[in-house]
Image (cartoon, rainbow, N blue to C red):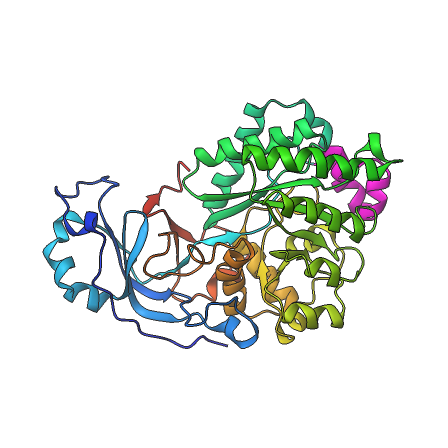
């Protein structure tokens, strides 16, 4: 259903640096305030409620037709119509000092928040790909030495500099798809040294990318080969070595665990969650991808998100609907694995669960950096509306990373992260299956070139 259009008057407040520019904004002056105008549809996603989007609220995009946005100091300072912006006394008085982008009737929305990615790896898993085409299942490939463990050797051998460049390349690809905030996991090292090296690579890549990166320790991604017959010992290493060191070095915000058949048990996940919380780190989990499990004990520990959720019970849906935990759906993995089964998005949404969407970018099961492609899958395969998919990929993604105060909507005071798409209707974003429809990206109030990203 098409979202209700909500007109919002342009605010006149601006930061002091924007009020008193000292020089004319020359071409390429990146420090000057920025005005985006002539926006056919400005998807602000504003809401009076301070909560994740659920049920019908997921379709409310708070669209301004003929919109305009003013950014300064890396923040959004004014949101309204182009007409109101042109009449604003401060904007009229300082026009020579402002960089302007004529959006020429395009669609502008918050930059995508990709809240689940695995960018630290060295090579694609092409053998897995061929085996899957021949009919092997996810678990059969893992049992034969493929899957997560097949990426471990490359990460263990690689230098941090090599991994940094690989991660940075992924971030830049994401920019070209309209993504401005990324959660990035470790998880292909499976030793304390390799996991810390992976998180160090994420940190170094983040310094070189103008977007926002949230790092996650995923030491409990799989039991490494050397601990297959003593998995509890490996859980102890994650809890007693990895987590304390990561917390001490401030290498991550979150700790993740893959809780499923063939990976770690609910009891293992509880142990990891408690260790993370004791060291001041937040928690999230891969869960219910291959089988269902009782989520209640983990929900009690306050995870920011449960990710995958292909097999989730009615009881768990009911409990999730009453919690702040986001169900992050990653249909790219279902598509690439060819399972024929997708997360039950409609049941989750209709039950009042707050859902988000993410790419699950990784070398084995979801080798895509494209959030527009994920939106398309959400619409065509999970029967989410285009409006629901956009909310799930922006404001609810921000909630999944607990960045909702800064990200996910276009409002005064939030970070100036915006995506400009060709076309005049937001529904075109998931409609066009293959890329090329992003016009421009604004990261921290700066326009990013897509040609040399």
Front residue of 319 and 59:
319
Q: Is residue 67 above or below residue 216?
A: below
Q: What segment is highlighted magenta in the picture? A: 125-151
Residue 151 horizontal/vertical position (percent): 71, 33
Question: Looking at the magenta stretch, what is its main secondary structure?
Answer: helix
**Left or right for 74, reference 361:** left
Is 130 included in the stretch rendered in magenta? yes
Return the x and y of residue 217 as percentages of the image width and height.
Answer: 63, 40
Residue at x-position 60% and y-position 35%: 246
Residue 235 in view (yes/no): yes
Nearest the eye: 370 or 74:
74
Q: Can residue 127 be seen in this view?
A: no
From this view, report whether residue 407 is shown above or below residue 61. above
Name the residue: 16% across, 58% down.
91
Q: Which residue lies furthest to the left in this view?
A: 93
Instruction: Classify residue 298 by image quadrant.
Output: bottom right
Quadrant containing the C terminus in the rendered view: top left
Is residue 71 or residue 429 the one in the foreground?
71
On the image, the x and y values in percent for residue 172 come to 47, 39
């Amino acid at each position: 259903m098409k979202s209700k259009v909500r007109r919002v008057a342009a605010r006149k407040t601006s930061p002091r640096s924007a009020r008193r520019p000292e020089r004319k904004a020359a071409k390429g002056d990146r420090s000057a305030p920025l005005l985006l105008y002539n926006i056919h549809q400005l998807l602000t996603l504003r809401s009076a409620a301070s909560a994740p989007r659920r049920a019908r609220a997921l379709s409310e995009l708070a669209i301004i037709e003929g919109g305009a946005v003013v950014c300064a100091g890396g923040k959004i300072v004014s949101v309204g119509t182009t007409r109101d912006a042109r009449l604003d006394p401060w904007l009229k008085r300082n026009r020579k000092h402002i960089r302007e982008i004529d959006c020429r009737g395009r669609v502008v929305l918050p930059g995508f928040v990709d809240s689940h990615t695995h960018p630290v790896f060295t090579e694609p898993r092409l053998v897995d790909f061929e085996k899957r085409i021949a009919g092997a299942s996810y678990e059969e490939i893992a049992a034969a030495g493929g899957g997560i463990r097949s990426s471990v050797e490359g990460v263990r051998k690689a230098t941090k500099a090599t991994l940094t460049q690989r991660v940075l390349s992924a971030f830049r690809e994401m920019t070209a798809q309209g993504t401005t905030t990324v959660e990035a996991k470790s998880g292909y090292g499976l030793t304390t040294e390799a996991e810390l090296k992976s998180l160090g690579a994420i940190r170094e890549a983040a310094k070189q990318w103008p977007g926002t990166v949230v790092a996650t320790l995923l030491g409990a991604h799989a039991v490494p080969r050397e601990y297959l017959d003593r998995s509890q010992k490996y859980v102890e290493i994650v809890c007693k070595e990895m987590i304390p060191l990561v917390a001490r070095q401030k290498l991550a915000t979150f700790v993740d665990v893959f809780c499923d058949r063939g990976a770690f048990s609910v009891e293992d996940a509880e142990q990891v969650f408690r260790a993370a919380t004791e060291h001041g780190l937040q928690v999230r989990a891969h869960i219910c991808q291959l089988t269902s499990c009782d989520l209640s004990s983990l929900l009690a520990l306050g995870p920011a998100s449960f990710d995958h959720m292909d097999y989730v019970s009615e009881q768990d849906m009911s409990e999730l609907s009453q919690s702040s935990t986001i169900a992050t759906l990653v249909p790219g993995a279902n598509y690439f694995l060819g399972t024929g089964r997708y997360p039950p998005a409609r049941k989750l949404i209709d039950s009042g669960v707050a859902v988000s969407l993410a790419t699950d970018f990784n070398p084995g099961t979801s080798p895509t950096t494209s959030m527009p492609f994920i939106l398309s899958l959400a619409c065509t395969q999970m029967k989410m509306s285009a409006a629901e998919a956009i909310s799930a990929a922006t404001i609810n993604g921000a909630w999944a990373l607990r960045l909702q105060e800064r990200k996910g909507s276009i409002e005064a005071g939030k970070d100036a992260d915006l995506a400009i798409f060709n076309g005049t209707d937001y529904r075109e974003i998931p409609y066009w299956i293959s890329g090329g429809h992003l016009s421009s990206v604004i990261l921290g109030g700066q326009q990013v070139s897509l040609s040399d990203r």
